[in-house]
Amino acid sequence: MRLNSYIADCGVTSRRKADELIQQGRVMVNNKVITSMGYKINSFKDKVFVDGERINLSQPVYYLLNKPKGYVSTVSDDKGRPTVIELIRTHIKIFPVGRLDYDTTGVLLLTNNGDFNQAMTHPSNNIKREYDVKLDKILSQDDEEKLLKGVFIEGGRGTFLTVTYPTNNKKAPTVVSSEGRNHFVKNMFKALGYTVTALHRRSFGFLTVKDLPEGSYRELTQRELKLVNRILNNKR
């Protein structure tokens, strides 16, 4: 993760102010003064000092939220809209892992662990996401095949790994993708002339919101934390 992000995540100051500290030569990594703005560290191995005092991240925390509609997946919002952070009762500074649209519901992770965030969202890790979709019209067989073979949208070609119909309703497919681009599912259908009227993320990697009411959250279980550690160990 970037050094300025690490300093901010430790609660020392904002990311912008952290850049100033770095420029002023007040930050050391492994006993070496760092003045490069884009410098990256391994938060598990590197030792970071600000004004001679070592700083550390808080103990990693992981929350699973069944996101309701009407919340933005950011820490703050310049339009004054409610954020998902407001749904979690904690004194620890956390942030969402990736994003769900304002009107999208379902699985959303929140953490204070930047490395976990990167591991879960980086395209090279191919973390699968499963979505329940509602469309304005029936999905044709031809278009289903196009979604599986590849559709060109903003940001390049996109594909779904699977398209199924758990309720046997051609207006309500369930799709699986390893893509994390903003508005990806909506843009895929939009490219073929469909409008997504409702979108629910059923799962993200090994996590689901089964038995978790909309708007509710919980900490990850010990079993899930073991899987988190496995992901982080693979990243390293």
Image: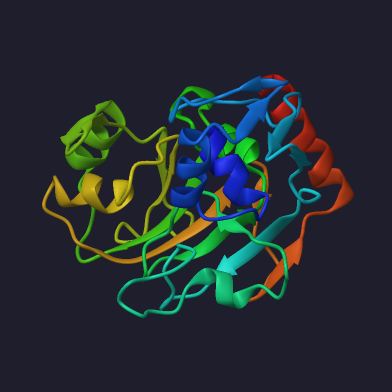
Question: What residue is rendered at 59% in x and 36% in y?
Answer: 26
Q: Quadrant of the C terminus?
A: top right
**Residue 109 visible, this angle:** yes
Question: Quick one: 56 or 147, which is closer to the camera?
Answer: 56
Question: What residue is rendered at 22% in x and 58% in y?
Answer: 138
**Residue 214 visible, this angle:** no
Question: What residue is rendered at 41% in x and 78% in y?
Answer: 70
Residue 101, given in percent of the width and then of the height, sits at 37, 62
Kindly give the residue lying farthest to the right in the view shown.
222
Residue 125, given in percent of the width and then of the height, sits at 54, 25
Q: How many marks?
A: 0
Vertical placement of residue 91 versus 181, above or below: below
Residue 154, given in percent of the width and then of the height, sits at 17, 39
Question: What residue is rendered at 41% in x and 32% in y?
Answer: 161
Kindly give the residue lying farthest to the left in the view shown.
193
Residue 77, given in percent of the width and then of the height, sits at 38, 70
Residue 134 in the figure: left or right of residue 13: left
Vertical placement of residue 13 versus 213, above or below: above
Question: Quick one: 103 or 77, which is closer to the camera?
Answer: 77
Residue 174 in the figure: left or right of residue 97: left
Residue 154 in the figure: left or right of residue 14: left
Q: Please tell me in which quadrant of the rendered image residue 56 appears.
A: top right
Give the image's coloring scheme. Answer: rainbow
Question: Quick one: 93 or 142, which is closer to the camera?
Answer: 93
Q: Please tell me in which quadrant of the rendered image residue 214 appears.
A: bottom right
Question: Quick one: 96 or 24, which is closer to the camera?
Answer: 24
Q: Quadrant of the N terminus?
A: top right
Q: Please tell me in which quadrant of the rendered image residue 44 appears.
A: top right
